[in-house]
Amino acid sequence: MSQSRTLLDKIFLVIKGLCMGAANKVPGVSGGIVAFVGGFYEEFIHSLQKINGKALKLLLNGRFKSFYNYVNGTFLTLIVFGMLVSYFSVSKILDYFLEQRELLVWAAFFGMILGSIYYIGKDFGHWTKRTILASLVGLGVGIAISFLSPATQNDNLFFVFLCGMISVSGMTLPGLSGSFILILLGNYVLLLVDSVNALYDTLAEVLGGDFGFVNDAARLDMLSILAVFTLGSAAGLVSLSHLLTYVLKHFKHMTTAVILGFITGSLGVVWPWKKTIFQTDDNGELLLDSNNKKIILNYERYLPNMDMAENWWAIFYIFMGIAVLLLLDWYGKHRKNAA
């Protein structure tokens, strides 16, 4: 993996990081799919796998340049930078459109996932009894996860650390949505909305010369929760990358078959036509969590009424999502032929 990259390559890596960051925040969408379809999944996993004992030894010995080259530092830095920027820019725009145009956003993501299934499967010519079985297992697990009911919010720091380790699988396993896992664990709003907004507000205040947050106990709690979640995510990324490097090396075809099945099974999570069911008490009143947010209980999916113009627009956006993946496919082939 070369550290020598053109300026255009570097810009595209930041854009890919932006897309991964945005995808990871949307329930049902996997940042790993972005990496897989964007053609940098294996480099991403192998670069993370390089964060090991040898890398730590280089760092402790002050051999920073050797450490940077060993872990494919240019690649990781640009991808992570894009992801961080996304959390405070692209993801906020996405939050707005999910609030204002939820159906169309889900339709676009549904189309993109359909396109990713085509993208991954079109060149997969290794169908055997074993890979078909592996794909069916992935399909079954994906469908099962789609219909699980969320738990309630839990801000225990040890549990938050575990949430970080588990949810980061969305970056490393295409088709497995880390944000949807957080919904199932009950901590989506706490970890990907409230704590991130607390950091955003704190940074904005500090840049304005206001350090009043140090006396705000609730804000400090949120920042500590985000810090622990980040540590858990980092630990999960490194540990999962080592496992996935081994799996991809020794069971690549089986792994691809499982991923194909899993992505197909998880389509139910991003089915555009669904109604959010919120938790209520015995009197039918909406229950709120500790941050006065409505608690998601599950989703009620339904078939669209094609007499409504908005549903035709949703169909259009599904095809737009597919087109995005086809364009990425074309771009990848064009780049390969030009090289």
Image: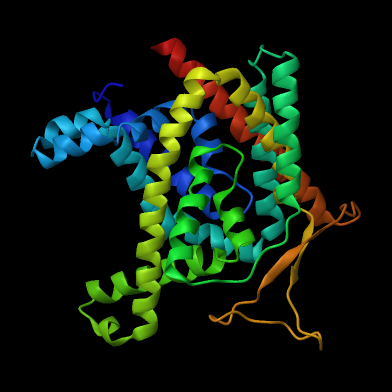
Residue 216 rendering spot, x and y as whole percentages: 33, 86
In the rendered image of this protein, does residue 256 appear above or below residue 62? above
> Which residue is at the front of the view, 52 or 29?
52
Residue at the location (13% across, 33% down)? 65
Nearer the observer, 159 or 259: 159
Direction from residue 267 to residue 231 in the image, left or right: left
Where residue 180 sits, quadrant-wise, is bottom right
Front residue of this view, candidates 310 and 12: 12
Q: In the rendered view, would you say 188 is above or below 233?
A: below
Q: Is residue 149 above or below residue 111?
A: below
Q: Could you tell me residue 303's position as x and y percent?
A: 88, 52
Residue drawn at x 43%, y 60% as measured from the top left: 161
Spot occupied by residue 157 in the image (x, y as percentages of width and height) = 42, 68
Image quadrant where one finds the C terminus: top left
How many numbered marks appear? 0
Q: Quadrant of the N terminus?
A: top left
- Residue 133 is left or right of residue 156, and the answer is right
At 41% from the left edge and 33% from the top edge, which residue is drawn? 242
Residue 154 in percent (x, y) is at 54, 71
